[in-house]
Image (tube, rainbow, N blue to C red):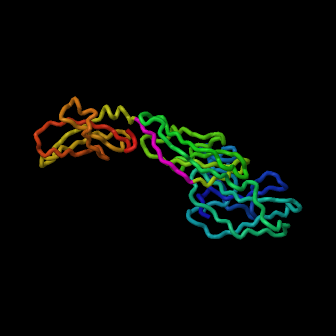
Amino acid sequence: YEIEFQWDGLVIELAENGGAFAPIDPIGGYPDTFAQTQAPPCLGTPGGTGDWINGCDYPPTQGCITGPAAGGLSGWEEYVFDLSARAGSTVQFKVKMSTDCGTDGGVVVDDVSVSDALLSTECATGSCLPAPTFTGILSARDVDTFALTGIEVSWGDVDDWGGGGPGTFVVYRDGEEIATLADSARTYLDLDAAANQKHTYQVIARSGSGCELPSASTARLRSEDCGALDTAGLDAARVNVARSPDGDTIILRAEPLPGALTYRFPWSQDPATVSGSSDVLTSGTPEARHDVALDGLNYFYQVEDAPSENCP
């Protein structure tokens, strides 16, 4: 395993005679706990009551397999669980990997053996399988390209919710979960995306009845919420003009505009037409150069923000 030490962990749970699943301890106890977990929860964390920052809602005192403390991949380790106190009962057990908002790393479980037990002659498919069949996201669009009105994400119906039945939709922005919605939802308006920047969206369907199996939908779409930048910054911006040593080039330097990714320098020989001029110099920095070849003419300039190539 390679797990974030004391933030993430592996826990074995057992259910007896069809009852609720609960953690059980290995002989000698778990090597550590979820000591670093804390409140409030990650946005949209599935499962549990949402009191703690880990997906299965384990408290900081819950024992777990976690680490290694120094980071990196562990070697193979063996854990033994004594079930003799449950003799005569039918038991089920599960291996639960619980992480916080970050989900790097993982666990491999191998060589599971059970002794002194009457086992079924074949493996039975759990009631949670199969996972939902879902195409995924259909669109991600800027509601209004001239105002900061958010990005609307939409998706279609689930083809088959699978063994767990109807559950929830989970929306991701740039790989981070941002919303969990009811099975009736088909759209989500993201008002928190950073403006004038490209973002990648994904939607998965997660089955219900406590199963929470995710669909395998991998579709992703990119969009951005275009809107005006800091107008106070625009009003304060000025273009400083200088000539290159050879006199053939006019050097334009502007004050940085908050949030601008691209700078536009409209120019004209008439001060009345410089605003909105089709003659424009574009630069990724607040500096541009205008080649004029000592033509002896007068030029007038203005600086504008151009947040991205997809925004007006």
Residue 13, image x, y percentages: 75, 57
What stretch of residues is rendered in magenta?
A: 218-227
What residue is drawn where x is 12% and y is 38%?
Answer: 297
Residue 292, image x, y percentages: 15, 44
The residue closer to the viewer here, 143 or 241, is 143
194 sits to left or right of 297:
right
Quadrant, the C terminus: top left
Tell whether position 219 is magenta: yes
306 sits to left or right of 168:
left
The residue closer to the viewer here, 128 or 134, is 134
Residue 243 appears anywhere in the view: yes
The answer to whether 115 is drawn above or below residue 66 in the figure is: below
Quadrant in the rendering for residue 273: top left
The residue closer to the viewer here, 230 or 301, is 301
Residue 181, image x, y percentages: 63, 41
231 sits to left or right of 93:
left
The answer to whether 218 is drawn above or below residue 299 in the figure is: below
What residue is drawn where x is 63% and y is 63%?
Answer: 107
Residue 72, image x, y percentages: 56, 64
What residue is drawn where x is 66% and y is 57%?
Answer: 97
